[in-house]
Amino acid sequence: MLTVADQQGQHGLDYITSGDPRTPTQSLHRAFETTLFQVPTAYAGDGSGQLVLASGVEARLIEAEAVLRAGDATTWLAKLNALRTDSTFDTQPTADPADDPAAVDTLWHAGTGGVPGLRPLADPGIDTAQVSLLFRERAFWLFLTGHRQGDLRRLIRQYGRSQVDVYPAGQYSIVGGAVNSSYGTDVTLPIPEEERVRNPQFTGCASRGS
């Protein structure tokens, strides 16, 4: 049984601890084990849910990346924020009024992405930080849709980042905290030998780089 990753390998995103409503999980125990697994709830566990292949959200993210690369940081940020919220919100007393009885929580209304609770983003102002923020938004909006691997490779190819700054590095711990191994250096998945046998016209890719 697999678990949702959280801050893995130095560069991994905080899919769980961020509390982001786009990456909801639930805690489960596997039979005969005490280890707690974090299972995504975006799709039905029995496989009956429909998988998103393409969406308007992805289209807006592509547009945001295009205008950022064109140097239009204002439009870039507006497109990301339009997905997050319509800029309206409600307030309610804070969850822990003992800390500050006058404090309130801001409940941001959903934007065109359809997920409530996302506050507007602020422009970090630095090119590299803007790119990092864009790809973080892609990771959370496109969670469980198979885009992250391609995005990591594009950060290397199109944005000039080094592999050690993009892909997981260091020791890899299995669920429960026991050290299992160390992350390797591969950035692609090898084609199984069975695929080569079944498709004699496919000879494989000579390059395993990003």
Image (tube, rainbow, N blue to C red):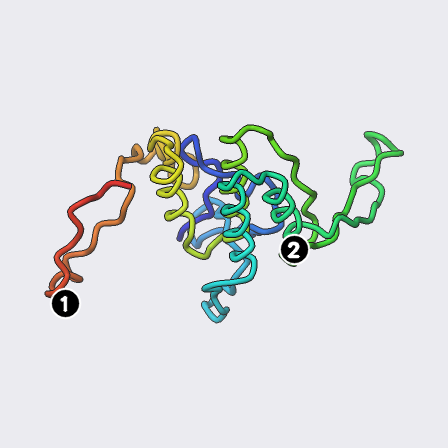
Drawn side of residue 24 relative to residue 152, left or right: right
Drawn side of residue 139 relative to residue 73, left or right: left
Give the quadrant of the C terminus.
top left
Q: Is residue 38 visible?
A: yes
Number of numbered callouts drawn:
2
Q: At 40% from the left edge and 36% from the top edge, which residue is drawn?
A: 159
Which of the labelled discs sits on residue 189, or is there none?
none
Drawn side of residue 113 relative to residue 29, left or right: right
For residue 209, which quarter of the picture? top left
In the picture as drawn, the residue positioned furthest to the right comes out as: 102
Which of the labelled discs sits on residue 198, or is there none?
1
Question: Which one is nearer the viewer's eye here, 122 or 114?
Answer: 122
Going by the numbered disc 1, the residue's amino acid type is Arg
> How far apart are the two marked residues, 1 and 2, measured between alpha carbons?
43 Å
Picture coordinates of residue 111 (x, y %)? 68, 54
Q: Is residue 103 above or below residue 66?
A: above
Q: At 10% from the left edge and 65% from the top edge, which residue is drawn?
A: 200
Question: Which one is nearer the viewer's eye here, 70 or 166?
Answer: 70
Question: Which one is nearer the viewer's eye here, 87 or 43?
Answer: 87
Picture coordinates of residue 45 (x, y %)? 49, 63
Q: Which residue is mark 2?
A: 115
Q: Earlier in the sequence, mark 1 or mark 2?
A: 2
